[in-house]
Image (spheres, rainbow, N blue to C red):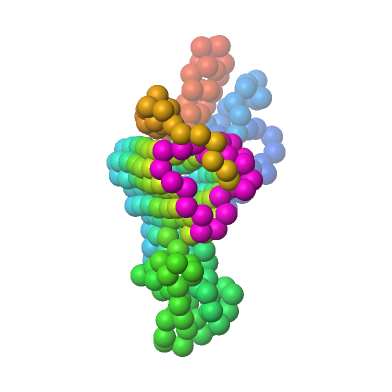
Amino acid sequence: MATKAVVGRGLREAGAALKHASGLEVCVICLFVSDEVYGHCRASVFTRHRPKMAFLNQKPFQTNDTFIAPTASVIGNVTNWDESSVWYNAVVRADSGFPITIGFLSNVQEGAVVTTLSCAKGAVNSDPLKSAGSHTNVTGVGVVAGGGEVGKVLDTGFPPVTHIGHYCSIGSGSVLVSCRVDDFCDVGDKCTILEGAWVESHVILEPGSVVPPYTRIPSGGRWGGNPIKFLGELGDGAKDGIKKKAEGRGVMAKEHAVEFLPVGSTYLHLEDLEREGKTAIQG
């Protein structure tokens, strides 16, 4: 542990030094270029951002073909099933002791937020994580205070988990809080689905829709507005389109996963310099 701490501190300090260094630009893989090529090679610095982060001994689970973008944040008790994807700047945060599940070939698009309620109804403190006498039950059924469970969060009596089924698309900028979205749903951009809400299968939510708490959206329809209103039944073509959209995002996710290099792409700049006949010294 001591060695790990020393190495971690050294990397952080080196990153800070690189970020504020003057004179020559320095690449993260330590390519030191001469004065004549200064300005051609851009600086890459160490980043402390972690796409996946454990919380309260709960860490995200993902399959080998799950794509989590390098600027996304997946925190706590989150399960990402096969070919699911969490896109750039999206946040999937299960830090209240209640799990989040993202199904097969489902996607959480750019800037979306998926989370769970952080406290139980009737809890001693509005935020149990800030109270020495109470804490969230990691089994996902309530809050423990003084050794005894206080109660459920949702008025329905169910735990406030967030469930996203298979072949679902969660649009950019949407917010989902302790709700259930069944299979084959297309949630448009900037939609809001609040606690206790249930969106059944084969449903399309128009962009900007707001689903109030404890609202049930029946299967097979198109809905939109604030608050949500029924707009019409879905035909077979629209239902097939939901699946095709999810599959298209899955293909795109594989392409992004192949292109992403954890060590960066500084070597490409070096190759450009060599083609231009510039001198570069690798240190």
Residue 223 percent coordinates (x, y) = 53, 39
Camera-nearest residue between 168 and 271: 168
Q: Residue at x 49, y 69 (%)?
A: 155
Residue 185 in picture, x, y percent from top left: 43, 39
Identity of the residue furthest to the top in this view: 276
* Residue toward you, 205 or 63: 205
> Which residue is the extreme one toward the bottom?
146
Q: Residue at x 57, y 54 (%)?
A: 212
User: As drawn, is 140 to the left or to the right of 120?
Assistant: left
Residue 71 can be seen, yes or no: no
- Please state if 248 lies on the left or on the right of 205 as rendered: left
The residue under the point 39% across, 30% down is 239
Note whether residue 234 is visible: yes
- Across and down, in percent, residue 237 comes to 40, 24
**Which quarter of the figure has residue 57?**
bottom left
Farthest-out residue, right: 22
- Residue range corresponding to the magenta coloring: 204-227
The residue drawn where x is 52% and y is 63% is 117
Decide: is 179 above or below 266. below
Task: Give the tally of numbered discs.
Answer: 0
x and y, in percent, of residue 138 in the image: 39, 70
Occupied quadrant, residue 220: top left
Say whether residue 210 is magenta: yes
**Figure check: 158 above or below 197:** below
Quadrant (top left/top right/bottom left/bottom right) for the N terminus: bottom left
Position above or below: 69 against 74? above
- Membership of 226 in magenta stretch: yes
